[in-house]
Image: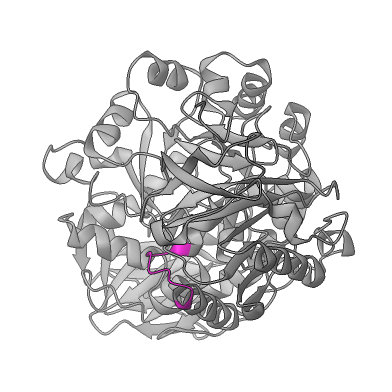
């Protein structure tokens, strides 16, 4: 991260300032300090900052003021610790770490715990290192969790690169690595898979935190076996019982409010109604796209939502500050306004509405009234990170044809069913017509085609299937190189010619998202970094993404956050039915399944 003195380096001066022997760099007076350790508001307390850290927090900082000290009058407003996002993937915002930081700083986020497993699937350990290095350059704290699962489900998908236990062990020596990213291969952990356990062991041997991902409603022996495997938290809960089960087993329950996932309201009742200890509950986003960041906020949005769901404002703030820092063994570094910690704070006039009026990190003001006032430095991304879409050939409509069984006039096909605002899908079936030996989609009954186009090794491979839930009509196609987690290319459409055009267009621009209708491109979001991210500002990307959403609506789709749903259709670790480069995947059984049901 951009330079801040370690506690050991800063301690002599911090002690001198607190004792009144030396002057602070900055003193904030006239405010009300939100103390997340004691869960109280300390009216009139003052804060002295030196060398980017809090030196004194108490009733009168007058003894810390010298001729060169900057004195800030908080005007009766609240001083709140900088907000922490406990689990997220920067790539899902379609932004580089620098541009993501630029977007969230005005919203009061000063610490992020990021798992770059998206780029790991495309570029492997080198991609993680690039994300890590740009993260270190930022004026806020971006801690990286080493991705654990690339591929997320071995044998069910092929990634651009694989992550090994040796990669994990190496990354644990990097300065910005704080733990292991979400362990999505929960069947592997439950089965005692040696590779998964070696990654967990390497993390625990380094004294760092193992992230969890238990995407199953089964809270019986399988769940207990997963917890015994070492994951320390989980963000895949969707109901109160999930949250309770996790904290009872010593895990932290991470409750998410992102652009597509709304899992706080259904779980926070474990605290607000059942009275469980709130120290074991943490708020996170698990992904916000650029439009959400620009128009709605980031962790400030999550805290406001938690309060609206019945949480005490101070409890909600604990869940977005000290609880997160403590979970990652960083409570002596951040997460509170207390001596020795990094001087990360928000000044706000209302603890419920939480307007972010000033943001400081490491003692420096970074934003005022929603406007960033500093630069967020960029890495010089190499060419191999910009040239990642390799189709191997120019695709045609024939590549998207689905041949029917010999002599069939109609087939019963398995169909991926999208569920609005949720990550899981349904395993549906539909009776579909056959024309000249080719199975046809049925837009009138909301059955479109889906294709997974291989884009890492240029094999020319296309896996075809069917999907329902988008409501597309007319001749159209949507293609994206953001295709969690293997990040091949997902194409959904009602017309094979448009599907081919969309896929070829993304190969031409180096990745992104495109929408075609009646043979013409009507929206494009270019994502040239690994086919996942743009170096443009969030406002620019958000505008292009908004046009993409409007284009999807013009094609008949009114599903909330439809693009997020589109991008997850290849996520072969979340039930029930997904698609990969190896075929249609039954995620309840973790096996490749036939597209057609037997007659």
Q: How many marks?
A: 0
The main secondary structure of the magenta stretch is loop
Q: Along the line of sight, which residue is nearer the eye, 161 or 143? A: 161
Looking at this rendering, what residue extends furthest in the left direction?
273
Q: Is residue 489 left or right of residue 475?
A: right
Q: Is residue 8 visible?
A: no
**Residue 555 within the magenta-colored segment of the rendering:** yes
Q: Is residue 51 visible?
A: yes
Colour scheme employed for the rendering of this structure: one colour
Q: Position of residue 305 (x, y in %)?
A: 26, 62
Q: Along the line of sight, which residue is nearer the eye, 267 or 83? A: 267
Q: Is residue 367 left or right of residue 245?
A: right
Displayed quadrant of residue 579: top right
Location of the N terminus (image quadrant): bottom right
User: On screen, 247 above or below 174?
Assistant: above
Give the magenta range.
554-562
**Residue 96 within the magenta-colored segment of the rendering:** no
Q: Position of residue 65 (x, y in %)?
A: 43, 78
Q: Along the line of sight, which residue is nearer the eye, 338 or 429? A: 429
Residue shown at the point (60%, 67%) measured from the top left: 477
Residue shown at the point (38%, 71%) measured from the top left: 346
User: On screen, 233 above or below 229?
Assistant: below
Residue shown at the point (78%, 46%) measured from the top left: 461
Q: Position of residue 106 (x, y in %)?
A: 46, 77
Q: Position of residue 369 (x, y in %)?
A: 40, 86
Q: Along the line of sight, which residue is nearer the eye, 537 or 353? A: 537
């Amino acid at each position: 991260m951009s330079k801040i003195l370690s506690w050991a380096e800063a301690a002599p001066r911090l002690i001198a300032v607190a004792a009144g022997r030396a002057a602070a760099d900055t003193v904030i007076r006239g405010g009300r300090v939100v103390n997340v350790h004691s869960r109280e508001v300390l009216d009139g307390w003052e804060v002295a900052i030196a060398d980017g850290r809090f030196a004194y927090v108490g009733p009168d900082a007058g003894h810390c003021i010298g001729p060169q000290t900057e004195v800030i009058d908080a005007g009766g407003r609240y001083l709140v610790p900088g907000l922490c996002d406990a689990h997220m993937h920067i790539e899902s915002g379609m932004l580089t770490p620098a541009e993501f930081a630029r977007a969230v700083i005005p919203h009061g986020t000063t610490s992020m715990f990021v798992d770059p497993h998206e780029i790991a699937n495309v570029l492997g350990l080198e991609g993680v290192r690039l994300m890590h290095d740009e993260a270190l350059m930022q004026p806020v704290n971006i801690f990286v969790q080493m991705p654990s699962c690339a591929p997320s489900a071995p044998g069910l998908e092929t990634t651009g690169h694989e992550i090994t236990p040796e990669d994990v062990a190496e990354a644990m020596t990097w300065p910005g690595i704080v733990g292991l990213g979400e362990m999505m291969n929960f069947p592997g952990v439950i089965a005692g898979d040696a590779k998964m356990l070696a990654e967990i062991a390497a993390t625990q041997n380094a004294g760092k935190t193992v992230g969890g991902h238990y995407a199953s409603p089964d809270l019986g022996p399988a769940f207990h076996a997963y917890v015994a495997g070492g994951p320390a938290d989980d963000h895949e809960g969707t109901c109160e019982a999930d949250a309770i089960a996790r904290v009872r087993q010593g895990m932290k329950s991470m409750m998410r409010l992102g652009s597509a996932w709304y899992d706080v309201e259904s779980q926070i009742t474990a605290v607000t109604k059942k009275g469980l200890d709130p120290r074991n509950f943490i708020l996170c986003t698990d992904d916000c796209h650029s439009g959400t960041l620009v128009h709605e906020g980031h962790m400030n949005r999550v805290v406001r939502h938690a309060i609206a769901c019945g949480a005490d404002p101070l409890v909600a703030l604990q869940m977005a500050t000290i609880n997160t820092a403590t979970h990652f063994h960083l409570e002596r570094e951040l997460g509170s306004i207390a001596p020795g910690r990094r001087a990360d704070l928000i000044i706000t006039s209302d603890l419920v509405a939480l307007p972010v009026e000033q943001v400081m990190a490491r003692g420096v003001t970074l934003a005022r009234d929603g406007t960033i006032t500093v630069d967020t430095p960029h890495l010089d991304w190499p060419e191999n990170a910009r040239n990642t879409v390799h189709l191997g050939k120019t695709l045609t409509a024939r590549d998207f044809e689905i041949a029917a069984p010999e002599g069939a006039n109609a087939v019963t096909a398995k169909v991926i069913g999208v569920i609005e605002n949720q990550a899981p899908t349904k395993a549906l079936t539909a009776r579909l017509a056959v024309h000249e030996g080719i199975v046809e989609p049925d837009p009138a009954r909301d059955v479109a085609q889906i294709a997974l186009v291989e884009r890492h090794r240029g094999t020319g491979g296309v896996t075809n299937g069917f999907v329902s839930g988008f409501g597309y009509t007319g001749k159209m196609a949507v293609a994206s190189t953001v295709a969690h987690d293997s990040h091949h290319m997902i194409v959904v459409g009602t017309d094979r010619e448009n599907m081919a055009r969309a896929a070829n267009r993304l190969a031409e621009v180096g990745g992104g998202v495109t929408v075609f209708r009646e043979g013409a491109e009507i929206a494009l979001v270019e994502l040239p970094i690994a086919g996942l991210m743009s170096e443009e500002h969030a406002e620019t990307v958000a505008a292009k993404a908004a046009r993409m959403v409007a284009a999807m609506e013009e094609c008949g789709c009114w599903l909330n956050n439809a693009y997020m749903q589109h991008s997850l259709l290849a996520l072969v670790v979340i039930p029930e039915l997904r698609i990969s480069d190896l075929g249609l995947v039954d995620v309840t059984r973790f096996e490749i399944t036939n597209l057609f049901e037997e007659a």
